[in-house]
Amino acid sequence: MGNLMGSWRYKEPSTVEECDSTWETDSESDEHQPGGEEEDSGISESMSPADAVRGAEQLDHGSPQFGDMMESSARMKRSFYAAKDLYKYRHSYPNYKEPRQPNEYRNLRFYLNKIPLVPDGIYIEEILTKWRGDYEKLEHNHTYIQWLFPLREQGLNFYAQELTQDEIKEFQSTREAKRRFLLAYTIMLDFFGIKLLDKNGNVARAPNWQDRFQHLNESQHNYLRITRILKSLGELGFESFKLPLVRLLLEEALVEGTLPNMRHSALEYFVYTLRQHAQRRALLRFAQRHYQPPENFIWGPPKKKRIPASAYTVMKAGNN
């Protein structure tokens, strides 16, 4: 198996188009059909510390994820950094090499309340019982989010350990860990002004939505947290929870106008955490109907090329 994997070569995508297969095999009738997931290679690749630093620098210097770009008359462009990051996530990090050291399952042990998060020394039960509604703490503490929502890529808290495929399987089969994970999810939803309605992941505005949406619209660094939460939901067995949340955020951003600063991040990042083509297409068609100005909508579907009249005449004559 090792030789077989060694002979396989992963080709890095070099354009946004190579990263995005959303509109391939596009069909109007597939939006309500199950399936449509992108192929999972079974191999994974994590973001290196250097990539993480470069990503952080882009965020700090006004990339769409940190603060939505000012839309102007100039033609907007998709972010290759965003497209590549989400491509790797959806394809289970191609060419990833598992750590050689025995995995300590630190993320799982944290969720079983056996070890605290580092560097703060806080246990999960303290967060679940004392942090709900403490918006100042949730806003200004920047070390807990990597522990609450672990990924198979390095975050900005280098004390947090990346997930491995074995740990993911163990986590998904551990009832207590999944129960606490959902409680952590509801704490963050409440922080954003959203409430979880049922076990299917449906969400709606929380009673405190007006104040929290105003804060969320103005504190755009939280959009990076939302991207991480969406990714983690998919890794730990809650892929179906993504669609209701992204749909709500798009509706608030594009239709209700309560989160206008979120528009670009929702379309450039949130939508592309979904692994099913059909779900992404449905969200993007919804967004396209409400996006203003419509000529600035750059997320598809791709425009069909028109055949020149002269060429059509030649083709028709040839067919005859």
Image: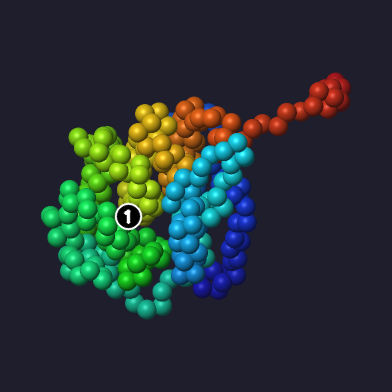
Q: Is residue 131 left or right of residue 78?
A: left
**Foreground of the two, 194 or 277:** 194
Residue 173 occupies quadrant:
bottom left
For the point 35% across and 48% down, the residue is 219
Residue 140 vertical position relative to residue 72 in the rendered view, above or below: below
Q: Is residue 237 left or right of residue 68?
A: left
Q: Is residue 257 left or right of residue 29?
A: left
Quadrant (top left/top right/bottom left/bottom right) for the C terminus: top right
For the point 64% across and 32% down, the residue is 303
Residue 206 vertical position relative to residue 274 in the rendered view, above or below: above
List the residue tagged with mark 1. 236
- Residue 285, horizontal then vertical, whole percent: 49, 31
* Residue found at the very far left of the displayed protein: 129
For the point 39% across and 64% down, the residue is 155
Q: How many numbered tags mark residues here?
A: 1
- Residue 199, horizontal then vertical, whole percent: 24, 41
- Image color mode: rainbow
Q: Is residue 138 something that shows in the picture?
A: yes
Residue 203 occupies quadrant:
top left
Tag 1 secondary structure: loop
**Foreground of the two, 172 or 157:** 157
Residue type, label 1: Leu
Q: Is residue 83 left or right of residue 175?
A: right
- Residue 50, horizontal then vertical, whole percent: 49, 69
**Foreground of the two, 197 or 298:** 298
Q: Is residue 33 something that shows in the picture?
A: no
- Residue 51, horizontal then vertical, whole percent: 50, 65
